[in-house]
Image (cartoon, grey):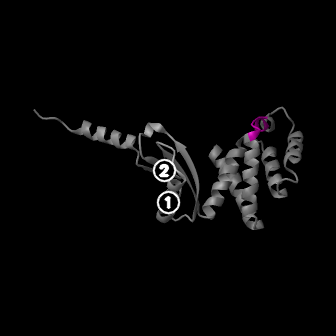
């Protein structure tokens, strides 16, 4: 259900931005709003609280965002408050961002390695991904997981490339377990 809500509202915001020709600006504003929401986690709880009147919630949104983001985005956030969907605001905005990135052929790659990567290695990975995909740019996210032992795992959307030593060892163990010993 939450996925349907985020898609419905995210698509609506995307269509408004396309119609207005403000896709880039709207993306920047949405990223800023998400940052504010991350830094002020209690704000979502407050605007989702059932005992606070909707008019008061709308005033809070206007005070927080009016003049800082476009009237379209402020109005969109107010609509979400009116519909009682503010708990899903982060998912909605993240869905919008993914639609914009898809439209602009910007991929999001999550790279997990056994050890921290140097800047040179990061550039090499990004260059290789640009060569082997249809994306023109990547938003790269890096993390370290020593449990991988060596190698790395790269996730782009629902695709995963796992070249970690841990997975190779697990696969070898599975293959060895399949072998039946004969006397």
Relative height, residue 71 to residue 116 (above, below): below
Which residue is labeled 1 in the image? 129
Q: Residues within 10 Å of mark 2 (few under 14, many from 20)?
A: many
Gap in angstroms between the C-alphas marked 2 and 1: 10 Å
Nearer to the camera, 167 or 50? 167
Q: Main secondary structure of the magenta part?
A: helix
Q: Are marks 2 and 1 in contact (CB under 8 Å)?
A: yes
Q: Is residue 46 magenta?
A: no
Question: Which residue sits at x=51%, y=44%?
Answer: 116
Chain part drawn in magenta? 39-45
Q: How many marks?
A: 2
Which quarter of the image is occupied by the C terminus? Answer: top left
Q: Residue at x 70, y 43 (%)?
A: 88
Depth check, front residue: 86 or 26: 26
- For disc 2, the marked residue is 154
Image x and y of residue 49, in percent: 79, 34
Residue 173 percent location from the top left of the image: 30, 37
Q: Quadrant of the N terminus?
A: top right
């Amino acid at each position: 259900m939450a996925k349907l809500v985020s898609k419905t509202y995210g698509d609506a915001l995307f269509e408004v931005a396309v119609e207005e020709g403000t896709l880039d600006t709207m993306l920047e504003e949405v990223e800023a709003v998400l940052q504010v929401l991350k830094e002020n986690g209690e704000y979502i709880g407050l605007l989702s609280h059932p005992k606070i009147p909707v008019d008061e919630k709308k005033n809070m949104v206007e005070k927080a965002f009016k003049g800082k983001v476009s009237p379209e985005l402020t109005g969109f956030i107010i609509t979400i408050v009116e519909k009682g969907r503010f708990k899903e605001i982060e998912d909605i905005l993240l869905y919008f961002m993914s639609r914009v990135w898809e439209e602009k052929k910007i991929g999001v790659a999550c790279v997990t390695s056994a050890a921290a990567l140097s800047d040179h290695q990061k550039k090499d990975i990004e260059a290789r991904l640009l060569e082997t995909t249809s994306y023109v740019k990547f938003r790269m996210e890096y993390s370290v997981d020593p449990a991988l032992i060596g190698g790395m795992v790269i996730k782009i959307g629902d695709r995963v490339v796992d070249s970690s030593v841990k997975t190779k060892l697990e696969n070898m163990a599975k293959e060895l377990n399949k072998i039946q010993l004969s006397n």
